Amino acid sequence: MPTRRPTALLRSHRGGTGRQHRGAARLSGCRGRGHVAAGGGGEAVLEVRDLHVAVGDDRGAPATALLHGVDLQVRAGERVAVIGASGSGKSLTAAAVRGDLAPGLRARGSVRVLGHEVLEVPGARREPGLRPAAVLQDPSAALHPLVAVGAQVAMPLRARGTRRGEVRAAVLDLLASVGLEEPERVADGRPAELSGGQRQRAALAVALACESPLLVADEPTTALDTVTQAAVLDVLARRTGRGGPALLLITHDLAVAAALCSRVVVVAGGRVVEQGALVDVLAAPAHPVTRALVTAVRDAGAPLRERTPPPGGADGRQSAPGRPTTAGAPA
């Protein structure tokens, strides 16, 4: 069933680049051969335990802590949202999961993908099956401006060993599956010939071509208009979760989280302040930050929708002391 607009999804709950391009396959999280099989039966695809990130320099200055003991888990077939205001630490958590922390940031703790410890391994050096696929807020950062879109989707397909004669058909199928009309025209064109929403869907096709067990989507709809946002959410709803990669969704928008996810992790000030089944968190938010997020949406006239957790249950409800986001906190 198509995903409705986020505003519509909120109406049934009464309770309450100057960046250097590095290639589509690398930025989307897969490159090269090799595969680490994903486990079935809802076992953990991602486990983050006691994750700390600090920034310092090489001159012995005291480090400034940005993340403070973040814990979260994503199981096979799950969609989990990490939600918080700007500066809360949600995108920094995603960068640690991807193995893409900026120079000067130091991490400790544990990040395990399919049971393999990867925190100290940069994403580009991980085995392909241990690199989460990624969709970022700005698709221009993930698509090379001078390379045809179809060629960029083909990169991870070839890396996975898709036969030469089958690559073109697979590229067109992927572009069509993410809602791009005229996939032949899109495949032969350059990213600049597409709209922002089309570029985001093309970047999503590149990520899906990796066939990673985990897709990390970091604010994938923030820069899009409402109609295009709904289209991208529909693609994520159809192509992730059961039968596809697990999803770790990074967002500041509780409406977007409600549209897709069965569990939510609320972060503020670099800490997890509450997490649990989305239906429970929406019905009775325990932490002041969570209550503020829910109240803000309700005050806007869009009551939040409940979403039933997937079969097998969700992680138990947790709440931890935390502080509201302050200026200068992590992104």
Image (cartoon, rainbow, N blue to C red):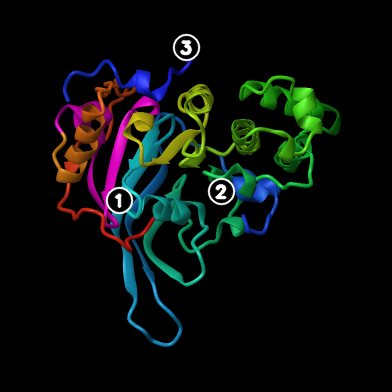
Residue at numbered disc 3: 1
Residue 71: mark in rendering = 1
Residue at numbered disc 2: 131
Label total for image: 3
Residue 221: mark in rendering = none
Alpha carbon separation for disc pair 1 and 3: 33 Å
The outermost residue toward the bottom is 59
Could you classify mark 3 by the number of other residues whose Cα lies within 10 Å: few (under 14), some (14-19), or many (20 or more)? Answer: few
Q: Residue at x 43, y 29 (%)?
A: 77
Q: Which residues are magenta?
A: 258-284
| Residue closer to the observer: 216 or 149 | 149
Alpha carbon separation for disc pair 1 and 2: 19 Å
Q: Quadrant of the C terminus?
A: bottom left
Q: Earlier in the sequence, mark 1 or mark 3?
A: 3
The outermost residue toward the right is 165
* Left or right of residue 249: residue 176: right
